[in-house]
Every structure is written in C-alpha cells, then in structure tokens.
Amino acid sequence: MKTLKEYIKEAEEKKVAIGHFNISNIEALHGIYNSARKLNLPIIIGVSEGEEEFIGRDEVAVLIRMIRQRDNYPIFLNADHHYTFESVKLALDAGYDSAIIDAVKLPLEENIILTKKCVDYARELSNKENREILIEAELGFIGQSSKLLDSIPDGVNEKTMTKPEDAKYFVEQTEINLIAPSVGNIHGMVKSGNPKLDINRIKEIHQSCGIPLVLHGGSGISNEDFKNAIEAGISIIHINTEIRVAYKEALEKYLKENPNEVAPYKILAPAVLAIEKVVEQRLRLFNNI
C-alpha cells in the first residue's frame, strides 16, 4: 500500500483531491468508510481536539490502524486542529498518520517556532518507529467553528487571507509537509451561503510554496469552486459541518417518526446512511467520478 504522502502526490498529479472527513463517534466512521470503500478511494479521518477527547485518542488510533491492516485499505488518521505541541505529540505517539498544528492566532514568528517544533518531533518519531508522519499548518484566518453560522466570522476578510510570499516564507522556515491557506474559505457553513474562493490566490500560493495545499472549511462551498480549487492546486479537502448537519437531521427525523424506539443501532442507522450519502457525493465530485 502507498503511504499517505504518496497518495497526496498522486492526487496532486491527477488534479483530484483526497476527502478528509471528521468524526467523533464510530457511526460517523462507518458512514465515511462505507462510501470510500464503495468508490475505492483513499480517505482521511480527522479528529479535532474536542472530537478526540470524546471518541478517545488511543481508541480511534487503534481502530483506524486495525481497519487499514484488516482490509489492506488506504484509510489514514489526522489530528485535526491541535493547538499545542503537547497535544500534537500525544496524537503522534498514539499512532496518528498526520497532525495539524494550528497556531494562526500567534504572531507569525511564534507560529513558525511552534510549527517547527512539531515538524522536528514528527521527523524524530518517524525515524524511531520507521513510519511516515506528516505535519500540516494553517496560515491565515478562516474562523474556528464547524457549525451553522448566521454570518461570516469576525476577523475573516481579505486582509487575513494568506499571501503567497508569506506562505513561501512559512514553508521554508518550518519545513512542513502540507499547508492550509485562507483563500475565501471559512470553518462552518453560513446559512445565507459561503463566500466564493479566491482561485487565483490558490494558484499563486501553490506555485510559491511548492507543497500540497489543503482546503479547510469545505462545507458549503459550491461545486464549481471545488473543481476550480482542485485544478489550482488543492489536494485535500476538509468536510465536517455538512456531515454533522446530515447526521443531526436524520436523527431528528427518525426520533420524531419513532418516538418509542430505544435501540441505539436502530436509531442511529439512518444517521449513518445520511453521512454515507454526503460523503459519496463529495468524493465523486473531488475525483471527477
């Protein structure tokens, strides 16, 4: 089986994107994995610090590793939006394939110092355990909440978008494997519609920094913008809010129609199917299927 780095490189060359979907319970994992298996596509499972605390850091690492070995399938685990070196270290020690150190609230040079510390530790652990670990960082601000929003988050504007020259400098100083820029994307979904992506900015950042780009805040972005962003250099796309909404709506509908049902496996089955549907639609779009 190819490594995650090799799958990302292949996606970059083919002008497609790997889907990254977040979970906080095993039902969501089943829905995402079922869709990936159906289409025979590599998949990245993400857990943020909050999601990781709920599902269990070690438990999810063991589960993903077991599935990968049992099925010989390219399913990978990412520590999504971890904010300290200590939390990144714990995830990598648990066996995660990659981690995102999110230090965008820090001044640039402090962000660089913290990010480089994570990169150095990942390399040390990679050599020690003979496995590949990738470190990603975010540059620019796109908000921090994966939920339905009434408006664009405060602080998300053209001034806080990633500049190509800053991305180049950041990559050179930190030696990260992946970078997630601010290019008009936001975390969460704006009820009235998400803003359009700055496709030219994506092209310029990709050309300037020379490493794969990750699009965070994919929920709510138009299909046209997704296609153009992938063509411009995006190789991984994060989706979270869309599957949370699908899960919640399917759960509410089932409980309303079946108020006396108490068996969790029956109550949650429609939610799993709802997640499968969203993930399959996104994976088909990201891979021109």
Image (cartoon, helix red, strand yellow):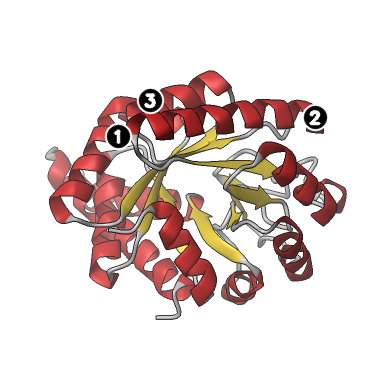
Q: Amino acid at mark 1?
A: Ala
- Distance of label 2 from label 1 (alpha carbons): 32 Å
- Judged from the image, the secondary structure of the residue bearing numbered disc 2 is helix
- The image's mark for residue 93 is 3
Which tag is nearer the camera, tag 2 or tag 1? 2
- Distance of label 1 from label 3 (alpha carbons): 10 Å
Q: Earlier in the sequence, mark 1 or mark 3?
A: 1
- The image's mark for residue 159 is none
The reply, left or right, for residue 125 in relation to residue 268 is right
Q: Position of residue 275 (x, y in %)?
A: 33, 57
User: Where is mark 2, residue-wise?
Assistant: 109
Q: Position of residue 214 (x, y in %)?
A: 58, 55
Q: Amino acid at mark 3?
A: Asp
- Judged from the image, the secondary structure of the residue bearing numbered disc 3 is helix
Towards the viewer: 140 or 125: 125
Q: Position of residue 38 (x, y in %)?
A: 24, 69
- Distance of label 2 from label 3 (alpha carbons): 26 Å
Q: Image quadrant for the N terminus?
A: bottom left
- The image's mark for residue 61 is 1
The reply, left or right, for residue 244 in relation to residue 33 is right
Q: Residue furthest bottom?
A: 289
Which residue corresponds to the image point at 22% horizontal and 49% vertical from the top-left?
68
